[in-house]
Amino acid sequence: RKERELIEKMRAKAQAEAAQQELGSRTGVADPQILADLHALGYTSETISLLHLVPLVQMAWAEGHVSLRERDLIIEAARARGIEIDSAADAQLKGWLTTRPSDELFTTTLRAIAAMFASRPEAERAAGEKDLLSYLTSIATASGGVLGFGAVSDQERAVLERVTAELQQAHGKASGPGGTEPR
């Protein structure tokens, strides 16, 4: 019985390591702790494509609810990133838009995104960050102000500042004395 338990533990560990390696190859993240955290949060090879959408989901939830316009913009961004209707990633995204994910999901995902960007060449990193911040700004302004234009709440501004700071911090770590080393 103990042998079977030990074998099962070893098998589970091997499966977790294989899943983490798959996440690493799909994201470009080399940090084993970030990969373990992503795996622990439930990311799989089918849902890792949602990584870049999580900050958008966080922005949508900044004021405590997701407006219809914010939801539509996030779904549109998902389709643009190749997330197909009725896929596992689509189901997960719709769940996140219905029930607010944990702060841990937001924090860990942002760390992974920052690590991904930090490991890329400068032009690719800058373009990815600009794209993410542009989407975040679109979500922030989607349901505020007059006719949905212009007003960004304090909560939304805080999310935007946090994402920007995390990306800048990761970039600073990557472009230290040795060039562009992944963190």
Image (cartoon, grey):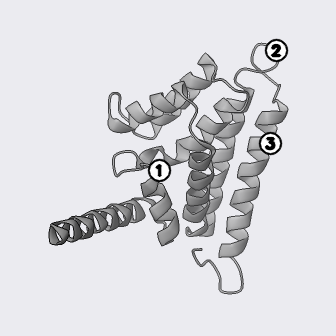
- Residue at the extreme bottom of the image, as rendered: 178
Mark 1 is surrounded, within 10 Å at the Cα level, by few (under 14), some (14 to 19) or many (20 or more) other residues, namely some
Q: Is residue 56 left or right of residue 141?
A: left
- Mark found first going from the N terminus, 3 or 1: 1
Circle nearer the viewer, 1 or 2? 1
> Residue 166: percent from the left, percent from the top?
71, 58
Mark on residue 41?
A: 1
Question: Vertical placement of 134 versus 148: above or below?
Answer: below
Mark 2–mark 3 distance (CA, rounded to whole Å): 21 Å
- Tell me the number on the disc at residue 146: 2
The secondary element bearing badge 3 is classed as helix
Please name the residue that numbered disc 3 is placed on.
158
Residue 143 x %, y %: 72, 20
Query: Where is residue 168, by image quadrant?
Result: bottom right
- Is residue 76 visible in the rendered image? The answer is no
Amino acid type of the residue tagged 3 in the rendering: Ala
Query: Badge 2 local density, few (<14 within 10 Å), some, or many (20+)?
Result: few
Question: What element does badge 2 sit on?
Answer: loop
Distance (Cα) linking label 1 and label 2: 38 Å
Residue placed at 55% from the left, 31% from the top? Answer: 74
Residue at point 51% right, 68% down? 33
Which residue lies at the image location 45% right of the left edge and 60% below the top edge?
27
Outermost residue on the front side: it is 1
> Quadrant of the image for the N terminus?
bottom left
Q: Distance of mark 3 from mark 1, alpha carbons?
A: 24 Å
Q: Is residue 144 visible?
A: yes
- Answer with mark 2 or mark 3, whichever residue precedes in sequence: 2
Q: Amino acid at mark 1?
A: Leu
Q: Could you tell me which secondary element the residue under label 1 belongs to? A: loop
Mark 3 or mark 1, whichever is nearer to me: 1
Q: Nearer the viewer, mark 2 or mark 3?
A: 3
